[in-house]
Image (tube, rainbow, N blue to C red):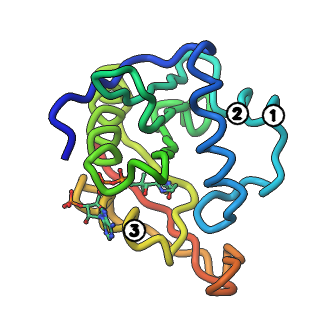
Amino acid sequence: MLDTMLIRDATTDDWPAMWPFMRRIVAAGETFSWDRDVGEEQAREMWFPAPPGRTVVAVDSGGTVLGTANSVRNHGGPAGHIASASFMVDPDHQGRGVGRALGEHIVDRARADGFRAMQFNAVVQSNTRAVALWRSLGFEVLATLPEGFRHPVDGYVGLHIMYRRL
Ligand SMILES: CC(C)(COP(=O)(O)OP(=O)(O)OC[C@H]1O[C@@H](n2cnc3c(N)ncnc32)[C@H](O)[C@@H]1OP(=O)(O)O)[C@@H](O)C(=O)NCCC(=O)NCCS
């Protein structure tokens, strides 16, 4: 567990520190439903959604970016009160509480922004660490899309839709 970690809004100045580990996570193809060879520009556009979307980074006391998360309106108009969110922690810094801190932060911010619930659209069933983390933060699995994700090692696995009220 890191004793000094700050979570703050990300700026595009943070991008050069974020992209190398984000690219690693996406290229592994085990947890994200993005094209594994996604281009840098496209990735940056997706990761910095327009307001009310938010993008944050977790940094250590030396300013090193440890992980990042974003939140978005999951739908618009009459369904615009449901948020969604995505998370990536640098594999070199996983297992130290960064993901949990980002999750708590994103949930609190979405609640403060007036969202009524948060829905994760595509949590890979075999990503057991993430599923356990989100459950511990109050999310439940609403449904599982059978064989929704083709994992490079496990083959076709389910994709969970996870949800919690805020
Ligand atoms: C999922 C992810 C965001 C979690 O971030 P993290 O910083 O590693 O998570 P934390 O250190 O906060 O640990 C969260 C839980 O994972 C489990 N965990 C952590 N390290 C672990 C390890 N090495 N092995 C097994 N479980 C582990 C623990 O149960 C921990 O819960 P605890 O707080 O009760 O101990 C991160 O692993 C990640 O970015 N993965 C790749 C992208 C991804 O899967 N994003 C989420 C898609 S839904």
Picture quadrant where residue 20 is located: top right
Vertical order, 6 against 132 (above or below) = above
Q: Residue at horizontal 61%, vertical 54%?
A: 25
Question: Circle 3 sits on which residue?
Answer: 141
Label whose residue precedes the other's in the sequence (3 or 2): 2
Question: Circle 2 sits on which residue?
Answer: 46
**Left or right of residue 84: residue 113:** left
Label whose residue precedes the other's in the sequence (3 or 1): 1
In the rendered structure, which amino acid carries the disc numbered 3? Val
45 and 73: which is toward the camera? 45
Q: Are marks 2 and 1 in contact (CB under 8 Å)?
A: yes
Q: Residue at horizontal 53%, vertical 75%?
A: 144
Which secondary structure, mark 3?
A: strand
Cα gap from disc 3 to disc 1, whole angstroms: 29 Å
**Left or right of residue 23: residue 123:** left
Cα gap from disc 2 to disc 1, whole angstroms: 6 Å
Question: Circle 1 sits on which residue?
Answer: 42
Quadrant where the C terminus lies? top left
Q: Where does residue 65 sit, x and y in percent of width and height?
A: 45, 30
In the rendered structure, which amino acid carries the disc numbered 2? Met
